[in-house]
Amino acid sequence: MRIGVLTGGGDCPGLNAVIRAVVRKGVKEYGYEFVGFRDGWKGPLEGLTMELTLATTRGILPRGGTILGSSRTNPFKIENGVEKIKENLAKAGIDALIAIGGEDTLGVATKLDALGVKVIGVPKTIDNDLNNTDYTFGFDTSVNIAMEAIDRLHTTAESHHRALVVEVMGRHAGWIALHSGIAGGAACILIPEVKFSVDKVCEWVESRFKSGFAPIIVIAEGAIPQDGDMQTKDQTLDAFGHVKLSGIGEWLSAQIEAKTGKEARTSVLGHIQRGGTPSAFDRVLATRFGLHAITAVHEGDFGKMVALHGTTIARVPLASATEKLKTVPVEMYKESEIFFG
Ligand code: F6P
């Protein structure tokens, strides 16, 4: 069989570990050939390919990003997009496709599966917001990056007796903020799932200063104040209708300074959270996802996504991964409130 592989959506550390595992097992155990499609769904749409062999996937385990490239191309927004994809898959002699991506990439895969394309999904996103999998790879690395930044910000905040607001990614789910805030000893954690009170944040800020330490406030880019709105960079939308979130951290800093008289600064971690080498957890999870994805192809179990359930790699219907966003349960968020202030 000839198998196509693509990586779509926001990149993250671990993508290359998936590719390496898929190719290694596919070639050595099943005798398969592989074709790499470039830049997400743009690859099948425009017939953009690259060689994917044991040789071209050696040494990529620790490398961040994706050797295939990625994009936020939505074929369902392109005229005759599905037909073009089917033609290019046939032209390349592709028997099945492995799509590695988040809600947008796997949403496209789900639709293509329903239209007869043989596809297996692999869940990827630093946001950890895909349904029906306990974790996605990329998440652990981004939490560690954010935690290391928070550890560093504690010392400069304390030196200058400042409140430091750390804005982290996660779009409309607060998993990165919650985990990095707990791990980093934040004075409060603000997530999209729970609208926040600026006055309450200022109380926590004052309380942390009174304890002799400087407050670090970890806020998710999609967090929303009770008497305000989500902050976006502009009104543009990407091909999947997403806004560009940006600005809530600066907005909160200004509020803190105005209401408490204390100096406040903001650090927006942005794409640093998506860069560099994957953590050990992500390398192992991504590798296991890749091994099980190519086995699912071998068994003809299409229309499925590999998923982590506990410590087991399961196969779940692709549609279940994107039928809703996996957000932080409020009761889990409330566990951490004891540390606020
Ligand atoms: O989905 C992953 C993610 O990093 C989100 O956390 C973030 O809001 C978005 O992608 C940024 O998208 P882009 O890299 O296209 O600016």
Image (cartoon, rainbow, N blue to C red):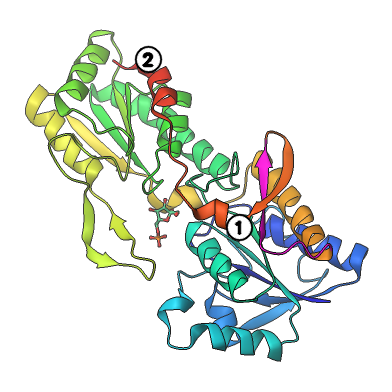
Residue lying at 48% horizontally and 78% vertically, measured from the top left? 75
Q: Is residue 156 left or right of residue 310?
A: left
- Residue at the image point whose x is 44% and y is 24% from the top: 332
Element type at marker 1? Answer: helix
Residue shown at the point (24%, 14%) measured from the top left: 209
Indicate if the residue with disc 2 has its beta carbon within 8 Å of ligand 1. Answer: no
Q: Quadrant of the C terminus?
A: top left
Q: Is residue 300 magenta?
A: yes
Q: Quarter-wise, where is residue 111 in the image?
A: bottom right
- The reply to whether residue 112 is visible in this rendering is yes
Q: Which residue is mark 2?
A: 339
Whether residue 275 is visible, yes or no, is: no
Q: Nearer the viewer, residue 103 or 5?
A: 103
Q: Position of residue 15 (x, y in %)?
A: 63, 57
- What's the amino acid at mark 1? Leu
Q: Nearer the viewer, residue 237 or 253?
A: 237
Q: Is residue 158 left or right of residue 36?
A: left
Type of amino acid under label 2: Phe
Span of residues in magenta: 299-309
If the picture is divided into quarters, which one holds ligand 1?
bottom left
2 and 1 marks in contact (CB < 8 Å): no
Residue 84 versus residue 294 in the image, above or below? below
Residue wearing tag 1: 318
Identify the image quadrant of the N terminus: bottom right
Which badge, 2 or 1, is on the more N-terminal residue?
A: 1
* Mark 2 residue element: helix
Picture coordinates of residue 57, whole percent (x, y): 76, 66
